[in-house]
Image (spheres, rainbow, N blue to C red):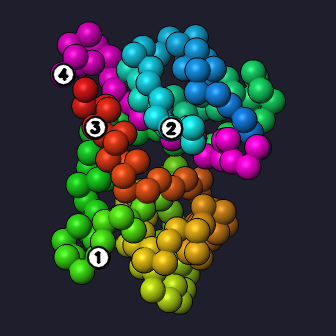
Amino acid sequence: MKAEQNNLTKYISILRGINVSGHNVLKMDTLKKMLTELKFEHVQTYIQSGNIIFEAAKDTTDIISKSIQTKIEKEFGFHVPVITLTQDELEIVIGANPFLNDNSKDPSFFHITFLSEKPNKADVEQLIQLNLNNDSFILIDKAIYLYCPNGYGNIKLTNSFIENKLKVIATTRNWKTANELLKMARN
C-alpha cells in the first residue's frame, strides 16, 4: 500500500451537518485546500456532504478529527463534528454489517451511523427498547447498522436522536457512500 510505504496512514473523515439546506456551507475545493494546509496529502472528497479521504502521518483519529474541526471553526466560524477512521477501521465496519447475511434485506436501504466513541451500555439499553416499526438497527462497537425499508428520511434514529440518547457524536452515511469511500481509500 502506497501510504504505508511513505510512512503515511490512509484516513477517512466524515463531517456532520455541512451543506444541508444552505447551512454550514463549505465547498469541497475549500475543504481540500484546508486539509492540505494541515499537511494532509493526496486529499480527495466525495460528494458535497463532507467525506474526505487523505493520507497523513500516523496519529490518533481523535487528534485528526479535532484538527479538522478547529481549522473549520477558525476559517468559517461554525462548529462541524468530525469522525475519522483509518482505512483498516472502515474496512472492518463495512465487513461487519450484520444485515449483509440476510437475503431478505435490500442493501439499498442499508445505512451506517458512525459514532465518535463506544456508547455507555445503559444508554444503549434504552435505545434497544424503542419501537422502530419496520426499521431495524444493530450496534457493534462504534457503528450502528441501520435497515430503513421506508427510507432514511422516515426513520426515528436520526443523528440528533442518537446523539441525545447515546451522548456521543453521530453521523450517518448510506451503504453506497460508505462503500465508495472505502473504494477510494483503497486506490
Tag of residue 105: 1
In this rendering, the label closer to the viewer, 3 or 2: 2
Q: Are marks 3 and 2 in contact (CB under 8 Å)?
A: no
Q: Please say whether residue 64 is one of the residues in the magenta stretch.
A: no
- Mark 2 crowdedness (10 Å alpha carbons): few <14, some 14-19, many ≥20: few
Q: Position of residue 54 (x, y in %)?
A: 41, 24
- Of residues 147 and 92, the one nearer the viewer is 147
Magenta-drawn segment:
1-22
Distance in Å between CA atoms under marks 1 and 2: 26 Å
Residue found at the very far right of the displayed protein: 77
Q: Residue at x 60, y 32 (%)?
A: 66
Q: Which residue is mark 2?
A: 47
Distance in Å between CA atoms under marks 4 and 2: 25 Å
Q: Of marks 3 and 2, which one's residue comes earlier in the chain? A: 2
In this rendering, the label closer to the viewer, 3 or 4: 3
- Of residues 30 and 157, the one nearer the viewer is 30
Distance in Å between CA atoms under marks 4 and 1: 34 Å
Q: Which residue is mark 4?
A: 1
Helix, strand or loop at mark 4 = loop
Q: Residue at x 39, y 16 (%)?
A: 42
- Mark 1 crowdedness (10 Å alpha carbons): few <14, some 14-19, many ≥20: some
Residue type (three-letter) at the residue carrying disc 1: Lys
Q: Position of residue 185 (x, y in %)?
A: 31, 31
